[in-house]
Image (spheres, helix red, strand yellow):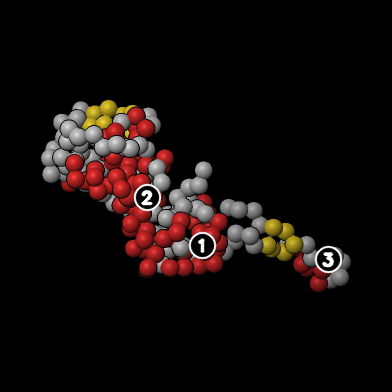
Amino acid sequence: MTRLCCTRFERAARKLGWLRKRRIVGLDDSKKLVAERRDELAPRIREHALAWSVAEIDAQRIDAWNIYQASRQAMTAALDQLSILPDYLLLDAMKLDVLIEQKSLIHGDARSVSIAAASILAKTHRDARMQEWDAVYPQYGLGQHKGYATADHLEALRQHGPSPLHRHSFAPVRESNCWAVGATQISFLQEIESAEGTAEPAIVPLQNA
């Protein structure tokens, strides 16, 4: 499974609302849909939803709170932004500290059309933002991999280090900014012995902190 390492909304932006009494064919977990299909469904969801919103959480808050807590904060913010206050919440494997009756569903985006619609709006919003940030940080190729930890993305991290969009709680990002990753050192004692002609210097790989 390829994980996200560059994000402002990783698993955090969510649409909350209701669909009108109109069936939208093809709603499913956004991860199971190709980008073109998500782009087709997103405007139809926005058109027929009674209310919807998307909230963003930046990488710094994810680092500070962890992904789960940052996701809860974004969901609460999205709820606050709705033009109509819901009387019941269906949530994807999560519970919010709000005074609204709610139900948490494991794999909710595969079991509920409302949660699936939310995941599609969140995903298309995030992908669009990655395209925008690609113009600001073209060296990372964000428009192609959308922030996922592909081989090209990880190589760009090694060459350029992380941007403000990258979350340091993700190990490849953290290591790309650490001088010691992949470094070697010479044992001080062996260096002295080598200088005295009693031994050859030994190169010892550093262990990651």
Residue that appears at 39% across and 49% down: 35
Look at the image and tell me whether residue 62 can be seen. Answer: no
Q: Are marks 2 and 1 in contact (CB under 8 Å)?
A: no
Relative to residue 152, is residue 72 depicted above or below?
Answer: above
Amino acid at pointer 2:
Glu
Q: In this rendered view, identify the residue nearer to me: 164 or 184.
A: 164
User: Residue 198: image x %, image y %?
Assistant: 87, 66
Q: Quadrant of residue 165?
A: bottom left
Mark 2: which secondary structure? Answer: helix
x, y percentage for residue 52? 20, 44
Indicate the secondary structure of the residue bearing disc 1.
Answer: helix
Circle nearer the viewer, 2 or 3:
2
Circle number at residue 157:
1
Of pointers 2 and 1, the one earlier in the residue sequence: 2
Chain-order first, disc 2 or disc 3: 2
Residue 199 in picture, x, y percent from top left: 85, 65
Q: Mark 2 = which residue?
A: 36
Q: Is residue 118 above or below residue 21?
A: below
Q: Position of residue 172 (x, y in %)?
A: 53, 54
| Residue at image mark 3 | 200
- Give the Cα distance between marks 3 and 1: 35 Å
Q: Locate residue 163: give its quadrant.
A: bottom left
Q: Please report the residue visible at 29 percent of the width from the left and 36 percent of the height from the top.
A: 25
CA gap, disc 2 and disc 3? 61 Å
Compute the Cα span from label 2 to label 1. Answer: 28 Å
Amino acid under label 1?
Leu
Depth order, front residue of 112/191: 112
Which of label 3 and label 1 is nearer to you?
1
Give the label, 2 or 1, closer to the camera. 2
Left or right, residue 157 beside residue 65: right
Q: Amino acid at mark 3?
A: Glu
